Each structure stands twice: as C-alpha cells, then as structure tokens.
Image (spheres, rainbow, N blue to C red):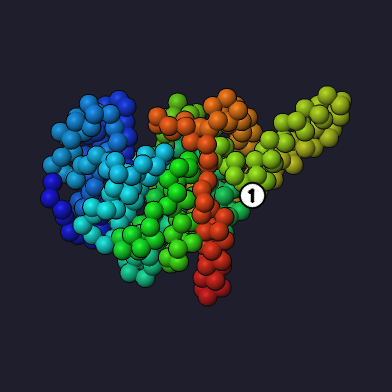
Amino acid sequence: MRRVRGKCSYLLPIRRTVFSITEAKNFATYFQALRAAGCEVIVIDGSYPAVFTRHAVIWGSICRHHPVNRRFTYLNDKVNAVHTGVAITANEKIILADDDVRYRAEEIALICERLEKFDVVRPQNFIVPAPWWSRIETARMLINRATLRMGDYPGTCACRRSAALRAGEYDGDVLFDNEEMIRHFARQGLSIDHQIDLFIRKNPPRFRKWLEQRPRQAYEDFGLRGKTIFFASILPLAVFLAFAGQNPPLIFFAAVLSLGSILIAAAGRARGQAAQVFPRSACWFAPVWILERVASTYAAFYWYLVRGGYPFGEQILSRGIGRDWFAGGRTASAATAKSLIRE
C-alpha cells in the first residue's frame, strides 16, 4: 500500500504465532476507523510466516503491512518492530500503540495538537470492559497513578519522527520497553507532555493471557530493588506472625496492608479526572493486587533462578529495565514537576 499523508502515522507492532480470523477482521475494522480519522496505518508484523501471509491478505489494502527489518537485532523483537516502523513512516507525527489499545478520532486529533508543542506525548490508559481480573489490573494502575508523579505506565505514546530519530535507538534488550523508550527520550533532552488526564482505552486481555503477564510484570520490577524487596517480604512476615502464634498482629498487619492499598488506589482515582473512566469498585481490588504481586514476585524469582531471565517470544530476557531507566526517570520527573508548578 502506498504511503498516506494525513494527521499522523499510527504504528502498530504485532506478533502472532497462531492466526485468528476474528482478531484479524476486528483489526481491519479498527484500521479503517483510524484511516477515517486521518491516520496512515503501519503494521510491523513479526508473526510466523504463515500467519504473516494471512494477515497480509486481510490488511494489505487498508494499511502498510511490513515485516520487521532484521538489521535491528535487539532481544525484544517489539523494539525492532518499532524502529522499523519509525524509519518508514510518511508523517512527522507518530502514534505508537500496543495491540490492545484503541484510539478514537478525537483523541488522535488532541494528541496531534499536543505534538505541535512537544516532542513526545504520553497519555494514560484505562481498561473497558473490565472483567474481575482487569479490575485487579485497574487497581494497580490507580496505585501507580497515586504514587508516581508521571502517572501509570501506558501502552501507547506519540512522538515527532524527527525527534525520535534525533534521540536514537533505545535499549531493546529489556522487558519494560514502552517506559524505557520514554525515559530514553527524556534523557536525550526531548520535551515530554505527561498527559495524565488524556485517557486512551485498552481492551482487557483474556484471562489466560492475563495470568501469563503476571510474572513478567513482577520481573520487570527486579531493577527496582526496594519495590521487589517490599513484595517479597510480605509472605515471610505473614508466615512468621502466623507461626509465632500472634494472631492479633497478623490480623492487624493484613488490615493495614489492605486498607492502605485501598486508600492509595482511591487517591489515584481522585487525582485529576480519573473518576470519569475508573470505576470506584476497582479500588476494592487493591488488596487482591497486592496478593497477586506477592505470588508473581516469587514466580519471577523462579524464572530468574531456573532460566536466567523471562521468556519473551523466542528469547530469554534477563533485564526488566534498561540503561536509561533511572537517569531518564529523574529527568522526566523533574520536568513534570516544573510543568506542574507553572500550571
């Protein structure tokens, strides 16, 4: 398909081992909506050859469908797909999104408007519809929103192509690639607009997929030692209190942990305009997320000890975060604090 100039280029990296006709047709409908909103749609497809071919039959007439350029050799093949797509876009403004993200025309227009002033725009995600396991994930998002100055980690961002090329390649040998890219941009001096009240919808994962993602998210946090130690310490502390015959302290410990997590999630929902998209009921799932993350941390320990890393596609990735995480995070946080003072 020829290059299409419009408001922006919408870049989707995707990889499938099995073809789904239902999913492919749903994406085709979404791509048509993106084109109607003024987007050039680019799909960089790292799927198995047979799956790639079937995708091409359905998507070929409504998007630019390309394989990953194998001159990029990062362990995380999604990063290779991103670099492939940025290199071939027809437009200066690029929206990069995971395969579960769904933009509307008005959100695309707003992001394109913000890219007139900033090199990078980082919105926030919310999940709809929200089965019970996605409400646990929503509780995590709200806790991050309450405790992180830059808000929760989204599965999408937008950037100016010239700025991304100027910043150069980011660390692609890590699991937490989305945020690593943002922090790389910050460290390279790009201006970043942390739009914590620009909410972009995500589809919920299937339950089996959600379960598969739990240890990976915990593994991504291994570089954040304080956070990992906190979650890893909850189980032995609870076991100690239980076997010490100290039921009142154990009950008090569980109550403080539960109530504290609920209140933090509620604070995240109260920040900005989050109440418009996050249901109040999600806050009550915060203690469940704490328990899930404790279990997932130990599952991640298993992967680290047995395999030396966590499987991502056909690779084993040993690092959750990369070279720009801390320095880029400090730069982005300081810039966000200054913008909040100006406001």
Q: Which of the pair 138/278 is nearer the observer?
A: 138
Tell me the quarter of the picture where residue 166 sits.
bottom left
Q: Which of the pair 147/329 is nearer the observer?
A: 329
Q: Please, what secondary structure does the residue beneath circle 1 have? A: helix
Count how many numbered circles sit on residues in the image. Answer: 1
Taking the image as shown, residue 249 lies to the left or right of residue 157, namely: right
Q: Position of residue 192 (x, y in %)?
A: 44, 64
Identified at 72% across, 35% down, the residue is 234
Q: Position of residue 303 (x, y in %)?
A: 56, 28
Q: Position of residue 197 (x, y in %)?
A: 46, 59
Identified at 42% across, 45% down, the residue is 172
**Residue type, label 1:** Ile
Q: Residue furthest bottom?
A: 342
Taking the image as shown, residue 171 lies to the left or right of residue 341, namely: left
Identified at 18% across, 35% down, the residue is 56
Q: Is residue 99 above or below residue 196?
A: above
Q: Is residue 56 above or below residue 273?
A: above
Q: Which of the pair 327/33 is nearer the observer?
A: 327
Identified at 32% across, 54% down, the residue is 95
Q: Position of residue 157 (x, y in %)?
A: 39, 54
Q: Which of the pair 187/268 is nearer the observer?
A: 187
Inspect this view and state whether residue 15 appears: yes
Taking the image as shown, residue 168 lies to the left or right of residue 243, namely: left
Q: Is residue 287 above or below residue 168?
A: above
CA neighbours of label 1 inside 10 A, class few (<14), some (14 to 19), many (20+)? many
Inspect this view and state whether residue 195 appears: no
Taking the image as shown, residue 68 lies to the left or right of residue 276, namely: left
The residue to which callout 1 is attached is 264
Tell me the quarter of the picture where residue 149 sits.
bottom right
